[in-house]
C-alpha cells in the first residue's frame, strides 16, 4: 500500500483519496466511486490505504491460489469465488481483498449482495497475497476481518515464504497438518498444500485439492448447501 499522495488531473484535493485519510465508509464509498478506472484504495478500520503498483511476485502467485479456489467453486454448488471485489463490511471498513470464497445467500451464506452489486457483509473465507502489504494484511486487515465476521483468513506471505492460516473466530493462527496441508474448516474439502502453493508445484497442489474434494466431508457439505437452497426456494414460494 502506498503512503504517497499523487494528484490526479481533474480532481480537486478534497475529492481525492489519500493514504492515511480518516473517514466513514459512506464518505469513502462516495469518493471511491468518483475515482478513475484502475485506481484502487481500501478503507480499513476507518483509515484509507491507497494501493501501490503490483510487482511481479504478486502477479504470478495470485493466479495460483485463484485457480485452486476456482476449482473448489466448480465442485461445490452454492459457493462463489470473488477476485478483487469490494466488500462492504462495516461503518469504517470497505476492503477489496485479493480473493474470497463465500456461501451464496440463497444457500445459507452469511453475506448478501447489495442492490448495486457489492458484497454486503463478511465472506466466510478471505485470502490475500502479501508482499509489500504484508504488515497491513496481517494486522489492520486481520483485525477488521475478525471484527466483522470473516471466519477464516489465508495470507500468502511472499517475503517470508509462508502461508498464514488464521481462524478468526478464535483469534488463533493454525498450522498445516503433519502432511503440510491446510484443511480449511469453513469449506470442507478445500485442502491447500502450503509448500506446493508457495513453490507453484501444481501437481502436488491439485492432488491435495482433489483428495479433499473426494472426502465424505465435502460430499456432506454439498448436500447441506443443496438442502439450504431448497428451503430458501420453498420459503419464497409461500
Image (spheres, rainbow, N blue to C red):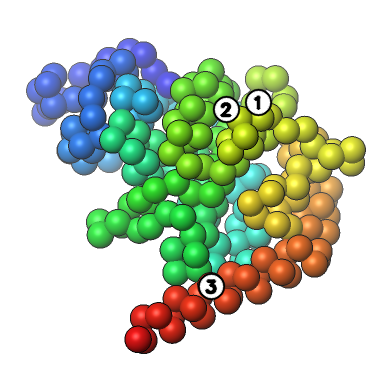
Residue 180 x, y percent position in the rendering:
84, 38
Identify the residue position indicated by label 1 in the image: 158
Mark 1–mark 3 distance (CA, rounded to whole Å): 38 Å
**Toward the viewer: 160 or 151?**
151
Instruction: Say which residue appears at 26% left-offset and 18% top-offset.
Output: 21
Figure quadrant of the C terminus = bottom left
Query: Sequence-wise, which precedes: disc 1 or disc 3?
Result: 1
| Residue located beneath label 2 in the image | 130
Q: Can you tell which mark lies on residue 210? A: none
Are the residues tagged 2 and 1 within 8 Å (C-beta)? yes
Q: What is the CA distance from the residue labelled 2 to the residue labelled 1?
A: 6 Å
User: Is residue 53 visible in this depiction of the protein?
Assistant: yes
Q: Residues within 10 Å of mark 3 (few under 14, many from 20)?
A: some
Residue 80 is at least partly visible in this image: no
Residue at (63, 66) in percent of width and height: 76
Taking the spot 25% from the left edge, 59% from the top edge, the residue there is: 115
Q: Is residue 186 above or below residue 238?
A: above
**How far apart are the two marked residues, 2 and 3, measured between alpha carbons?**
35 Å
Q: Is residue 31 left or right of residue 135?
A: left
Determine which quarter of the picture holds residue 116.
bottom left
Residue 88 vs residue 116: left or right?
right
- Residue, x 46% and y 55% (percent of image)? 110
Pick out the residue farthest to the right: 178
Lateral position of residue 72 relative to residue 119, left or right: right
Amino acid at each position: 500500500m502506498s503512503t504517497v499522495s499523487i494528484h490526479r488531473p481533474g480532481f480537486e484535493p478534497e475529492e481525492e483519496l489519500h493514504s492515511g485519510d480518516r473517514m466513514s465508509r459512506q464518505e469513502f464509498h462516495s469518493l471511491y466511486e468518483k475515482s478513475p478506472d484502475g485506481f484502487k484504495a481500501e478503507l480499513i478500520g476507518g483509515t484509507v490505504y491507497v494501493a501501490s503498483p503490483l510487482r511481479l511476485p504478486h502477479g504470478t502467485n495470485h493466479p495460483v491460489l485463484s485457480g485452486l479456489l476456482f476449482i473448489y467453486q466448480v465442485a461445490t454448488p452454492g459457493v462463489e469465488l470473488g477476485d478483487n471485489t469490494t466488500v462492504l463490511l462495516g461503518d469504517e471498513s470497505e476492503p477489496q481483498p485479493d480473493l474470497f470464497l463465500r456461501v451464496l445467500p440463497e444457500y445459507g451464506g452469511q453475506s448478501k449482495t447489495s442492490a448495486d452489486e457489492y458484497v454486503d457483509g463478511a465472506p466466510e473465507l478471505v485470502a490475500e497475497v502479501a508482499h509489500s502489504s504484508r504488515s497491513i494484511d496481517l494486522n489492520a486487515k486481520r483485525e477488521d476481518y475478525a471484527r466483522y465476521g470473516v471466519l477464516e483468513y489465508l495470507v500468502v506471505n511472499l517475503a517470508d515464504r509462508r502461508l498464514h492460516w488464521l481462524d478468526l473466530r478464535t483469534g488463533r493462527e493454525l498450522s498445516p497438518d503433519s502432511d503440510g496441508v491446510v484443511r480449511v474448516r469453513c469449506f470442507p474439502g478445500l485442502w491447500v498444500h502450503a509448500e506446493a502453493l508457495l513453490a507453484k508445484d501444481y501437481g502436488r497442489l491439485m492432488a491435495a485439492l482433489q483428495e479433499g474434494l473426494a472426502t465424505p466431508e465435502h460430499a456432506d457439505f454439498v448436500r447441506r448447501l443443496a438442502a439450504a437452497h431448497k428451503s430458501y426456494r420453498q420459503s419464497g414460494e409461500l
